[in-house]
Image (cartoon, rainbow, N blue to C red):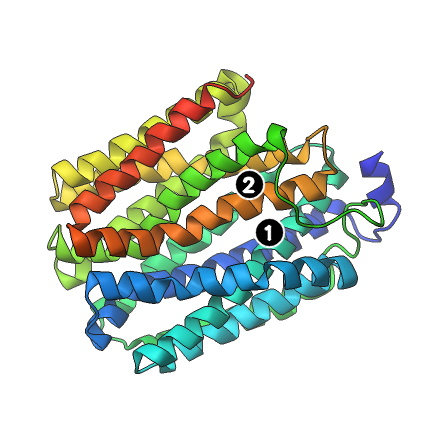
Amino acid sequence: MLTQTLSSSVVRPRHIYRLAVGATFLLQGLCFSTWAARIPTVQQQLGLTDTELGGVLLAVPVGSVTSLPLTGWLVARFGSRLMSVLGVLLYALGLPLLGLATTVPQLLGALVLFGLASNMANISINTQAVGVEGLYGKSIMAKFHGIWSLAGFAGAAIGSFMIAHHVAPLPHFLLMSGVVLVGLLAARPFLLPQDAPREADAPIFVLPDKSLLLLGLLAFCSLLCEGTMFDWSGVYFRKVVEAPASQVGYGFAAFMSTMAAGRFIADWFTDRFGRKRTLILSGLLEAAGLLLAVLAPGIVPATVGFMLVGLGVSSVVPLVYGAAGRSKTMAAGVALAAVSTVGFAGFLLGPPLIGLVAGATSLRVSFSLIAGMGLVVALLARRVGA
């Protein structure tokens, strides 16, 4: 029924919409990974301690949480197509603002706006993905998130190149902002014109009911680990692993490469071994990888550890989002928004938490605590249906 309803409102072959939505995931991933790759540089330029950096990074979740009601209303009022374009546009324009920040207050303001744009892009683009899934009548969410991960890998590699060649953040950010804007102009005409149908008076964003709370908690724990890797992997390699400047980005690149690869095989692996076993294995890989990096903080073991973490987090969010979209207690779009909101909170709160714990103890201790989130994923997954 959903496939028929959506198909009647589109005028292009479904693969065109899939490519366009995939492109927006790519552009969103480039924006975030471009910033994440230069966090160690910004920390050095502003002379921030780990505790101070953790406090500064709280500005991103502040902007994101602040924008939640606004983004929900805008998507409901104007549709995810327009809001996807606006979200990615603001996200790209936020990069030069981050590069222009020369004081902590300026950086805080830029990060609040960056968080607002991030959330707007995240919710509207995933809403587009739900609509494309409706056209195909099967789950393809993992592959969309795999594209986002590939963009993260590319952003990390570009960031490492810029650091190795002593390119300042501002010209780096200006270049990537231009690339994203050109890509957005190309993808915009081919985005899905209509969202998956919902009841007219149904809320867009609500807290998950009891049947969805487990999915939200799984996403929260895994995304807390993922957010930590994005914002702190470079700092960890510089301060704990003591990698040369040209190799500071190796950990982040290793994490992103296995996360991307894992998401492209997630559907096949789940079909063969079941959702419960896949989630349990994912949590164990997250914990094992982080503990390896903590216990053996050399370049090779830490890189291998970060690869295990990437493989571990790769399947959790796509599986959770897919299960939420098939909820029998809420409309698909509402369930997805509810679960993704809870999960995304972990993605945003992880990096500041790392900074606060590291300031009180050390980065190795804080990474050990995040390893515990992987074990929680494995434990919670035992209650998930096969």
Q: Looking at the picture, how far across and down is residue 147, in whole percent?
A: 51, 48
Q: Residues within 10 Å of mark 1 (few under 14, many from 20)?
A: many
Query: Closer to the camera, 86 or 257?
Result: 86
Name the amino acid type tagged 1: Gly
Relative height, residue 325 to residue 65 (above, below): above
Query: Closer to the camera, 351 or 241?
Result: 351
Q: Which quarter of the image is occupied by the N terminus? A: top right
Residue that label 2 marks: 143
Q: Looking at the picture, how far across and down is residue 216, in whole percent?
A: 53, 37
Q: Looking at the picture, how far across and down is residue 82, in whole percent?
A: 71, 65
Q: Residues within 10 Å of mark 2 (few under 14, many from 20)?
A: many
Name the amino acid type tagged 2: Lys
| Residue 179 visible at all | no
Numbered badge on residue 22: 1
Q: Quadrant of residue 35?
A: bottom left
| Residue 150 visible at all | yes
204 relative position to 168: left or right: right
Q: How many discs mark residues in the rendered view?
A: 2
Q: Which quarter of the image is occupied by the C terminus? A: top right
Label 1 with label 2: CB-CB less than 8 Å:
yes
Q: Furthest residue to the right?
A: 8
Q: Earlier in the sequence, mark 1 or mark 2?
A: 1
273 relative position to 333: left or right: left
Task: Write the residue at 84% across / 45% down.
Answer: 199
Task: Write the residue at 62% across / 28% down.
Answer: 211
Badge 2 marks a residue whose secondary structure is: helix
Task: Write the residue at 19% across / 57% down.
Answer: 359
Q: Looking at the picture, how far across and down is residue 351, in whole percent?
A: 34, 54
Q: CA distance from mark 1 to mark 2?
A: 9 Å
Badge 1 marks a residue whose secondary structure is: helix
Numbered badge on residue 201: none
Q: Quadrant of residue 99?
A: bottom left
